[in-house]
Amino acid sequence: MGATRREFLEAGAIIGAGAAVAATAAITARLDHRTTDPVGEETVRHIEVLPSVPPSPEEDVLVRMQRDLARAMAKPVEQRRWVMIIDTRKCVGCHACTVGCVAENHLPPGVVYRPVVTEEYGEYPHVQIRFFPRPCMQCDVPPCVPVCPVHATWKRPDGVVVVNYDRCIGCGYCITACPYNARSRDLGEYWLDGAAETETTSELPILGQNAPWEKTPSNEYAKSWDRTKGSPVGNARKCHFCLHRLEVGQLPMCVTTCIGRATYFGDANDPESLVSELMAAPNVIRLLEHLGTEPRVRYLI
């Protein structure tokens, strides 16, 4: 576990009492502890996808990506290279991916992992709009990682940048460092704040009552995060490619909810994957590529 706010406060009290050396040593020991991600055979997952249905050129791209996912998960994590490609020509700006992500990760007000940005381009009278869903870019050179004073965020062997909610102290350095505005802080708010605090078994708020779904724990990072007991309240939060879904053989929620099949996901280390084909297209771009962050999210324009 990482250093908590309480530990920082307790350390401050020790320093005030004259034990600065001991307190500093204790905090340094906590902050120097980095997470070692599992690798090798223990990360291999064997997932079956429609075993009785052979692959077909006419099959839905979701089925093909599901097959791609199964092949990727059959390899150790360090041999995978997750990539997301978004086709702006197919995106209709419906925000289904945004809503699906909020529902999947039980996101509170002010925390959005996948907003959809609207861009207007062209000159009058030939003006058009297009939409850019903007998840975390999962940069190969993530500027959010080196600025974290407690090593609460890092890049996994498969390239996904993650956050340890137990270690994060909510300083906000990573939020400021991200040039894509892909991180936000959980301020502990609820959608029905201010509503009557009454018991109800209904799944919907009735006459101002709180709904049970609002405080359902999140399953991010394959753990149970109960915001009523602390983390991730106060922490930095971000898109993580739905790692908890990948572990059980499911595509990221934003991919499955896209009504226009505009979002593609897979292993770039697999030459047979759909994303490997799309990455070679001449109309592929990456946002703010001049910054040298090497984002793994690409766009077809």
Image: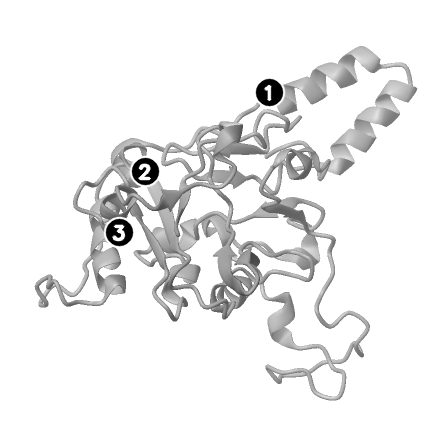
Which residue is situated farthest in the top direction here? 21
Vertical comparison of 174 with 228: above or below: above
| Residues at discs 1 and 2 in contact (Cβ within 8 Å) | no
Q: Where residue 108 sits: x, y (%)? A: 65, 61
Give 276 or 130, whichever is nearer the viewer.
Answer: 130
Disc 1 from disc 2: Cα separation = 27 Å
Q: Secondary structure at mark 2?
A: loop
Residue 32: which disc?
1
Q: Secondary structure at mark 1?
A: loop
Q: Where residue 154 sits: x, y (%)? A: 51, 32
Q: Where residue 103 sits: x, y (%)? A: 53, 67
**Nearer the viewer's eye, disc 1 or disc 2?**
2
Q: Residue at x 42, y 32 (%)?
A: 37
Vertical comparison of 162 with 231: above or below: above
| Image side of residue 10 versus residue 166, left or right | right
| Image side of residue 236 versus residue 280, left or right | right
- Sequence-wise, the earlier of marks 1 and 2 is 1
Q: Is residue 115 visible?
A: no
Tag 3 residue: 69
Q: Where residue 144 sits: x, y (%)? A: 59, 32
